[in-house]
Image (cartoon, grey):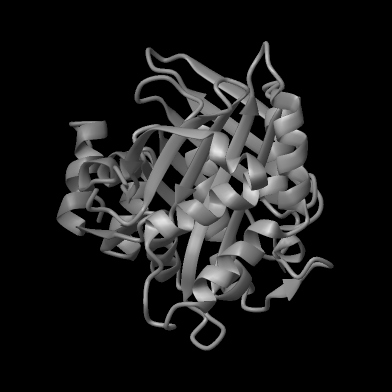
Amino acid sequence: MSSTDRIVRGLVAGSQARFVAVVATRLARDAARRHEAEGSAAIALGRAGAAGLLLATLTKGDERVTLQILGDGPLGAVTVDATSGGEARIFLRNPAAGARVTEDAAGRPSIGPGIGRSGIVSVVRDLGMRDTFRGQTELADGEIDTDVEKYLAMSEQIDNALACETLLDAETGEIRCAVGVLLQALPGGEGAAVLEAARARLRAGELAAALGRTLGALDADAPPPPTSLMDQVAQAALGERVDALDILDARPVRFHCPCTRDRARTTLGLLGQDDLAAMIREDGAAEVTCDFCRTTYTFTDADLEEIRRELRPEAVAPS
């Protein structure tokens, strides 16, 4: 596979538990660059991107999942659109508010103070044919992965263990890796025991520790091989049970934003004729910037007038 970002899926000990892991380092770096995010803001983008991709693996076909973490912290809402095919895009409301990184008692980078301890997790699954599923739960602690784990257990009744981690370079602050792992108990086996052991290891900080060991053995400028990261993710989650993991398939992960100039044009049309007329008189132009990819589409006064006339063909041009 040419992409260094990827998702792998498998089964533990035959059919006791479903295993999904994702490496989303390039995706997270791209999001951080687009949003000029540093520190805890960059970590939030990485964790959210990995969590959104993990949620999308629970869909069928090419269904799309939108994950929103809406906390009361200074970073504001973080939103991820992801598909089971490995496409994703990420948006953080206030990336400039997240330069400082703290650690929890286990030495894990903590973003709860930035996301907030109070708020909701909202998930929309686009099932196609205008059919959607919506669910939400209260935040667990603002760390994103524990919030999504709680959401799956309470809203979708999926017994799971989920963890996402993003580590930064101590010198440059750049994202060195962004990963995630999800285990789901399957009926008719001992999956609950697999999850209980995995959750204990992950909550004790084993994932961050394993990644730190892998990164510490490499030069600061060397990107960690995705296979090495996947091995560490599996080991951190499963411990001695890692030998019982059977990988079924793998697919690449990539950033994808479906925004276009036509969509931006449609957005301007929603303003209505009076607002467009005022924009032509007062500004003479308009810019529409995509929240996710930060692409800016510019519309001249002639473009705006064309949009306005399409709303009401007989409209008189504003003076």
* Residue 292: quadrant of the picture: bottom left
Question: Can the viewer see residue 26?
Answer: yes
Q: Give how far across and how far down residue 185 sits, in percent.
A: 66, 24
Who is closer to the viewer here, 256 or 170?
170
Who is closer to the viewer here, 70 or 161?
161
Who is closer to the viewer here, 189 or 119?
189
Query: Which residue is the extreme one toward the bottom?
Result: 171
- Residue pictured at 47% horizontal, 71% vertical: 176
Which part of the image, by quadrant, shows the C terminus? bottom left
Total numbered labels placed on residues in the image:
0
Residue 258 falls left or right of residue 32: left
- Residue pictured at 74% horizontal, 53% vertical: 142
Q: Give how far across and how far down residue 236 sits, in percent.
A: 63, 52
Residue 25 falls left or right of residue 93: left
Height in image: 296 above or below 103?
above
- Residue pictured at 52% horizontal, 81% vertical: 173
Who is closer to the viewer here, 248 or 43?
248
* Residue 160: quadrant of the picture: top right
Height in image: 19 above or below 27?
above
Height in image: 223 above or below 70?
below
- Residue pictured at 44% horizontal, 78% vertical: 218
Q: Give how far across and how far down residue 316 sits, in percent.
A: 21, 42
* Residue 13: quadrant of the picture: top right
Q: Give how far across and how far down residue 191 sits, in percent.
A: 69, 24
Question: Can the viewer see residue 78?
Answer: no
Query: Which residue is the extreme one toward the right?
Result: 105
